[in-house]
Amino acid sequence: MATTSHNANVLRLAIAQALSMTTMNVNIINTALVGALLAPVAWLATLPLSLQFMASMMTTLPASLLMARFGRRAIFMVGVGVSSLGAFGQGVAILFENYILFCMSALLLGIAMGCAGFYRYAAADSAEESQKPRAISLVLAGGLLAALIGPEIARNTVNLLPDSIYAGCFFTVSGVQLLSLISLAGLKIPKPEKRAAGGRPIGDFLRMPPFVVGVISSAIGYGLMSYIMTATPLQVVNVVKLGTSANATIIQWHVVAMFAPSFFTGHLIARFGVSRILWIGLALYIATLIVAVKAIGFWPYFTALSLVGLGWNFLYIGGSSLVASVALPEERGRVQGFADLMVTSTVAASSLTAGAIHSQLGWQTMSLAASLPLTVVFAGLVWLAFYQRRQVMP
């Protein structure tokens, strides 16, 4: 019975993940372009995206604590409502050419992102220890459906309202997002039992190499992916003039690369160990930068975004698995909330930095700058390797 309930939870969360990522895909494809149209100065084009990630950053810890108190389902459903309202507000902002309203609506989407980010941890809650990476991986696989739906919505609704380009995209996903309520309504995840001790303090986890490296891998992996993806529409559409359709195709296959491996990433972690998967993720990011620095036409941008999608999958799922493995049930609210706070903080900084560096220094310099945080991931993986070696030594 427990297995049946767990499988049903994973399916429902995967559907919710797919719909959430559909909204985010349309958002990523169009928001920087709308920002470029509405912003008073060019370097503020990516500010709405950065505000989303900042709102997500500020939401993660409170959302995690609220889930520990009221349960996952209630907070997830509130997040869906906020997401739909935010997307609708962005559409209205485009109609009235109001940059401030567009930014405020972006904040609402950020709050929703902060809630939806826990779908993967919710799947791991009812899984056995050995099955946690697989549960996380399968939920994130729901993003593959988003890769098929999101760019098609963006491509086919961009001129739905002829006098307000891009508005139709946001109105469409506002309605699509509400379908998540049907899936989440049947979610069955018990609240963790309250214990007097409340578990270990965060300081204890910050001395654990698996936790620290898990956070570093997830945060920098997600941050650099956002960094590159945020600037891509500006480069592809506004600089090299490949057009909105080419941009949608590049982002579409980028998202496919992000989520398609999720069907087997959990199995790879179980078979080869999380460390090897993280090393592969790092190698894919290095390959991304090599291609991106020399990108000229459609295919180099396509290849770079596909590679960073694959690298994100391995670093994010591998890192999340490490974080999920160290916390006891009564510790999850604080520990997972803290980990996601670090992730969303990094993503927020990355998206704003991408817009500023791209507008002032160009794509090549922006790509080269991404090599710096990768050295931190490298150092973390070396530290984890030494720690694991000491653990197996007699």
Image (cartoon, rainbow, N blue to C red):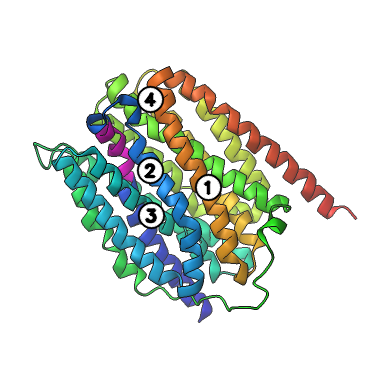
Q: Is residue 320 above or below residue 235?
A: below
Judged from the image, the secondary structure of the residue bearing numbered disc 2 is helix
Q: N-terminal of the two: label 4 or label 3?
A: 3
Task: Tell me the kind of residue under disc 2.
Answer: Leu
The one of 210 and 45 positioned closer to us in this rendering: 45
According to the picture, the residue beneath numbered tag 4 turns out to be: 299
Pick whichever of labels 4 and 2 is earlier in the sequence: 2
The residue singled out by tag 3 in the image is: 111
Q: CA distance from mark 4 to mark 2?
A: 31 Å
Mark 1 Cα shell of 10 Å, populated few (<14), some (14-19), many (≥20): many
Which of marks 4 and 1 precedes in the sequence? 4
Q: Which of the 4 image quarters holds residue 26?
A: top left
Compared to 265, does 95 lie above or below? above
| 223 relative to 118, above or below | above
Outermost residue, right side: 394
Q: Residue at x 46, y 52 (%)?
A: 58
C-alpha distance separating marks 1 and 4: 30 Å
The relative height of residue 48 versus residue 326 in the rendered view (above or below) is above
Q: Which residue is mark 1?
A: 343
User: Residue at coordinates 64% horizontally, 35% vertically from top-left?
Assistant: 376
Q: Position of residue 287 (x, y in %)?
A: 54, 28
Task: Specify the segment rendered in magenta.
Answer: 25-35
Q: Which amino acid type is marked by label 3? A: Ile
